[in-house]
Image: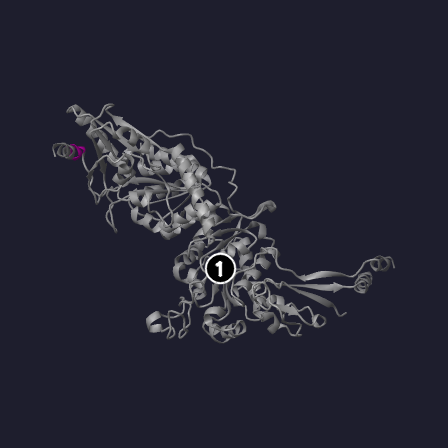
């Protein structure tokens, strides 16, 4: 057979099964060991590459541990003031509608100081994508209570545990946004094992696809870990997400513009 | 057809969180005995032959340190070519 | 005939501005009204923000794409924009911000005032902050300054503030319009929007934890201010060529002074007005020139004595006297004349 003769001439070689995504720069990320910020970055980058959006994308880095995200995404990037990511993203999207614009925000940035901007962006049905990292704590500023801190959770500013009588109850961002007509895709995911990582990747992909389709506002909440301020090992942190965080923050696709209801 | 794989870990970017080691179902990975420049004992490949290419380590790595290749031998290519021909 | 607010908006459109983000506040509401009507008709975007915090950050986002973009507000709203203004400067992004000043502090009132002089020239944000600041005194000048502000802002990569007040914002005057320009088609080399055609990625950023780098950025910005001072400083002089009194005032106060100077001339008193049209950069040269040639220097302003500080820094230690009202109270030319006579008598 002619084919056999041909292949025999070829030496053994390697085929890449998994490569670091091109939408990440070569810069080492500055997150603590085991922090799922890095996992989230990697998934976003994989999705941008897969959807061939990397060269159209503007990433918005906000304030918090992920402030240096502009060094990690191999895209045009803008660093925004604390909480104002969705407003900055809107300004870019309105002047450069062909661009794919996403914000990457922690729970302090999005749920505390920036709550107004994210809600109004959703209300306008702004064609931007928000990646919301919820690890129930302010990481960069040394572990203070966040709006998403669990009841009873000890932080550096709730040393006796969050008391709902004093500090209220955890803020449920997805539930708050789920009734807004401008929202095209809305999901809560986590990254505690290969299956949930794959699920998170799928939701991130759908969120960017929603933007590319011009369907409206999209947000994926990623229930994340903070080994440093939870005072747990990386693996224990993933277990704590499974056992405690997901009880408060159930995983769910809240809105999917492609789903037939 | 059983494939063999090569797992490459960027030892300088690895922060030794150990998640790849925890989630590897084949005990391919372990911690190195020497430190990297940042002072971590990074993950390393300790039993390459056992790897089944499931990608779980790469999926769990928070630092995008892991890349995986499949080794394609000439025999495989013959088999692949023949399967196409048939 | 058009109001100062409309002239400001029309000046921006004529300059090629197609993006406006703002939040309602009196006394500048005619600017967003006009923009919301006009911009969609010419391929632009008007978007009402949920707050001034959002407004200035919408501006920041739009500015990062290299677009001609503006917002307008009044004193309390500008206070809310301070952080965003500082980010604009730090990230070296140009944008035009209009402040139609009202009485303050606090909620104050909606009467004309000049009490945001320090806010605009000194403290419109944290850090080694400043923005180029125009102080027009007429509807025509509001139009012209706003028209020029976009190109100037882009030339020096600095935020530009148009410092008006409730009076010139809402009075009507005949205004000569210039040719409407199309928005720039060539985006600057720092503008983001996706690294199309494989160009290197661009980052808009004001975070520099490596302190010598932060210092270098500040020095680079300062150098642009220095250049702008050489090339963009504007002022007007009015009145007697051999004056005994040099009045200095900007904006609405300058108009009042002009009338006062004319009447004083009728009474045989020789007076001249030195009116900065830019207060950052401040026209220090003409002040230095006149300071030694007059008997007194009188600063007229509608604030507690803010503008007078820059005047004092520019007159080679000569005494400067203050005539001012505050809280939104507007002086008449008669009041300026009467208080000038008191100064002379004392």
Residue C87 at x, y percent in the picture = 41, 49
**Residue C253 or C340: which is nearer the viewer?**
C340
Image quadrant of residue B25? bottom right
Q: Is residue C286 visible?
A: yes
Residue drawn 28% across the image and 40% down it: C165
Residue drawn 38% across the image and 35% down it: C229
A106 w.r.t. C112: above or below: below
Residue C61 at x, y percent in the picture = 45, 48
| Crowd band around label 1 with a 10 angstrom C-alpha radius: few (<14), some (14–19), many (20+) | many
Q: Tell me which segment is drawn in magenta.
A: C333-337
A161 w.r.t. C124: above or below: below
Q: Which residue is mark 1?
A: A66
Residue drawn 62% across the image and 68% down it: B34
Residue A15 at x, y percent in the picture = 72, 60
Residue C171 at x, y percent in the picture = 27, 36
Please state, as top left, top right, bottom left or bottom right, where the C terminus of chain C lies in the image.
top left
Please state, as top left, top right, bottom left or bottom right, where the N terminus of chain C lies in the image.
top left
**Residue A256 or C248: which is nearer the viewer?**
C248
């Amino acid at each position: 057979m002619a084919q056999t003769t041909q292949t025999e001439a070829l030496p053994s070689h390697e085929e890449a099964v998994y490569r670091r995504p091109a939408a990440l720069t070569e810069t080492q990320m500055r997150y603590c060991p085991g922090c799922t910020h890095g996992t989230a970055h990697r998934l976003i980058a994989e999705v941008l590459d897969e959807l061939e959006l990397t060269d159209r994308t503007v990433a918005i880095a906000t304030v918090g541990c992920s402030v240096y995200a502009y060094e990690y995404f191999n895209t045009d990037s803008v660093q925004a003031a604390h909480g104002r990511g969705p407003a900055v993203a809107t300004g870019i999207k309105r002047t450069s509608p062909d661009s794919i614009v996403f914000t990457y925000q922690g729970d302090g940035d999005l749920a505390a100081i920036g709550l107004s901007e994210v809600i109004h962006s959703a209300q306008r049905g702004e064609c931007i994508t928000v990646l919301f990292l919820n690890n129930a704590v302010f990481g960069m500023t040394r572990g203070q209570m966040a709006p998403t801190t669990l009841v009873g959770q000890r932080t550096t500013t709730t040393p006796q545990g969050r008391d709902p009588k004093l500090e209220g109850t955890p803020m449920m961002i997805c539930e708050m946004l789920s009734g807004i007509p401008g929202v095209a895709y809305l999901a809560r995911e986590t990254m505690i094992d290969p299956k949930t990582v794959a699920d998170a990747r799928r939701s991130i992909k759908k969120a960017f696809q929603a933007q590319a389709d011009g369907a409206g506002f999209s947000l994926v909440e990623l229930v994340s870990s903070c080994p440093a301020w939870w005072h747990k090992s990386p693996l224990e942190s993933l277990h704590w997400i499974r056992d405690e965080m997901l009880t408060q923050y159930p995983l769910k696709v809240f809105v999917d513009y492609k789903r037939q209801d | 057809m059983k494939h063999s794989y090569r797992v490459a870990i960027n030892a300088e970017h690895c922060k030794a969180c150990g998640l790849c080691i925890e989630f590897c179902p084949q005990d391919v990975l372990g911690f190195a005995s020497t430190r990297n420049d940042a002072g971590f004992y990074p993950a390393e490949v300790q039993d390459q032959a056992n790897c089944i290419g499931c990608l779980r380590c790469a999926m769990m790595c928070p630092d995008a340190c892991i890349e995986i290749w499949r080794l394609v031998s000439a025999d495989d290519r013959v088999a692949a070519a023949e399967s196409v021909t048939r | 005939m058009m109001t100062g607010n409309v002239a400001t908006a029309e000046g921006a459109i004529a300059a090629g501005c197609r993006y406006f983000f703002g939040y309602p506040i009196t006394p500048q509401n005619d600017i967003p009204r006009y923009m919301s009507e006009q911009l969609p008709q010419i391929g632009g975007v008007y978007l009402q923000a949920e707050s001034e915090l959002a407004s200035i950050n919408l501006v920041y986002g739009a500015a990062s794409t290299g677009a001609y973009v503006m917002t307008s507000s009044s004193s309390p709203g500008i206070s809310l924009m301070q952080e965003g203004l500082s980010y604009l400067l730090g990230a070296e992004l140009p944008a035009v911000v209009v402040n139609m000043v009202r009485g303050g502090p606090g909620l104050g009132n909606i009467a004309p005032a000049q009490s945001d002089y320090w806010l605009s020239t000194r403290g419109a944000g944290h850090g080694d902050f400043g923005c180029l600041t125009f102080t027009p005194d007429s509807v025509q000048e509001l139009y012209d300054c706003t028209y020029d502000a976009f190109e100037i802002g882009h030339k020096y990569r600095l935020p530009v503030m148009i410092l008006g007040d409730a009076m010139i914002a809402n009075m009507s005057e005949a205004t000569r319009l210039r040719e409407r320009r199309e928005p720039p088609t060539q985006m600057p080399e720092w503008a983001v929007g996706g690294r199309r055609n494989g160009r290197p990625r661009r980052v808009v950023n004001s975070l520099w934890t490596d302190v010598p780098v932060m210092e270098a950025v500040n020095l680079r910005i300062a150098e642009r201010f220095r250049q702008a001072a050489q090339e963009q400083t504007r002022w007007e002089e009015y009145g007697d060529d051999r004056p005994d009194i040099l009045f200095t005032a900007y904006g609405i106060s300058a108009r009042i002074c002009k009338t006062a100077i004319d009447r004083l001339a009728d009474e045989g008193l020789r007076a001249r007005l030195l009116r900065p049209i830019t207060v950052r950069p401040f026209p220090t040269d003409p002040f230095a020139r006149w300071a030694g040639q007059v008997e007194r220097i009188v600063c007229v302003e509608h604030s507690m004595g803010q503008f007078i500080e820059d005047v004092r820094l520019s007159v080679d230690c000569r005494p400067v006297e203050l005539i001012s009202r505050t809280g939104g109270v507007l002086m008449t030319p008669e009041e300026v004349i009467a208080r000038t006579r008191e100064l002379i008598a004392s």
